[in-house]
Amino acid sequence: MAWQRYVAIGDSFTEGVGDPAPDGSLVGWADRLATHLSAAQGEVEYANLAVRGRLLGQVVDEQVPAALALAPDLVSIVAGGNDLLRPGADPDALAAVMEDAVLRLRAAGADVLLATGVDPRATPIIGRTRGRSATYNAHLWSIAARHGAYVLDQWGAAWVQDARMWDVDRLHLAPEGHRRTALAAAAVLGLDVEPGWSTPLDPAPELPRRERLAGELAWVRSFVVPWVGRRVRGRSSGDGRTAKRPVPTPA
């Protein structure tokens, strides 16, 4: 395939949180994927409408129409992770919303790239969402099969389980994680990519138990407590934010 206009929509994962540029802006896997597309097939126009903190319904209601207005021939839509973190989240209902979005994008002639969530088995607290996350992932594969979409499989990626692939908040990828995710997405889309990107890093030295416990407590204080506070107040990390790249420009 040769795509001329790629539009990325979603939440903080696609916005690029955890992958800062020297000037303070965010890069992220989607920006990196757009660069790979341009390098492989010539100039590609790229827009990124993702905003951190967005729930799936907000992505579908706000970003899908905006993406369709840009007449893309490739759209990545990765959302639902923020919903699944909330108690009582219904992965079946989320899948129905996602399928409607995929149908709209495919009906407009765009190819669609989905992405499964990462297996949270090794992450304290977030690991409790594993069952509903797995159910939602299964739906994504079925949606892709029914409507001819591509799927970036993060659940089955061994390398992404390494803590060094993640930012200190444990919710967002670090630069190396974003770099590898972009390569994984490029491979799914059929591009030739550099070899070895999926090879896990050599094991890291194990920290003493006391340091591990101190790290867990620091993480809870610095990230879990503020997250709960925002939920209680009905606030979002994306309040007041807009898309970082709303207009398609050469990648």
Image: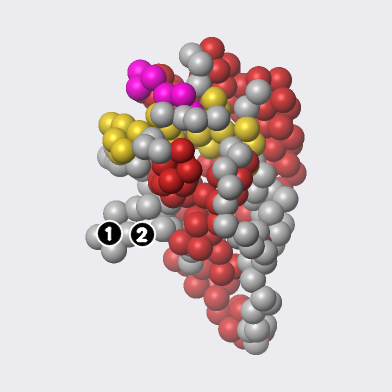
Q: Which amino acid type corresponds to the residue marked 1 in the rendered image?
A: Gly
Tag 1 secondary structure: loop
The residue wearing badge 2 is 20
Please name the amino acid that badge 2 sits on: Pro
Asked whether 120 or 197 is in front, the reply is 197
Q: Does residue 19 lie above or below 51 as drawn? A: below
Residue drawn at the location 74% of the way across and 35% of the way down = 138
The location of residue 48, given as percent across then percent down, is: 37, 37
Q: CA distance from mark 1 to mark 2?
A: 6 Å
Front one among 147 and 120: 147
| Residue 230 shows in this picture | no
Residue 208 at least partly seen: yes
Q: Residue at x 47, y 30 (%)?
A: 3
From the viewer's perspective, tell me whether residue 50 is left or right of residue 132.
left
For label 1, the crowd category at 10 Å Cα-Cα, with few meaning under 14, some 14 to 19 and many 20 or more, is: few
Q: Is residue 179 above or below residue 240?
A: below
Is residue 45 positioned above or below 203 on the image? above
* Labelled pair 1, 2 in contact (Cβ < 8 Å): yes
Q: Which mark is residue 32?
A: none
Q: From this viewpoint, which residue is outermost toward the left?
A: 23
- The answer to whether residue 156 is left or right of residue 30 is right
Q: Secondary structure at mark 2?
A: loop
Q: Residue furthest top?
A: 107
Residues rendered magenta in the picture: 69-75
Query: Quadrant location of the N terminus?
Result: top right
Q: Position of residue 18 (x, y in %)?
A: 43, 58
Give the vertical position of 105 relative to 50 (above or below).
Answer: above
Q: Which mark is residue 24?
A: 1
Residue in the picture at 58% in, 25% down:
98
- Across and down, in percent, residue 8 comes to 44, 35
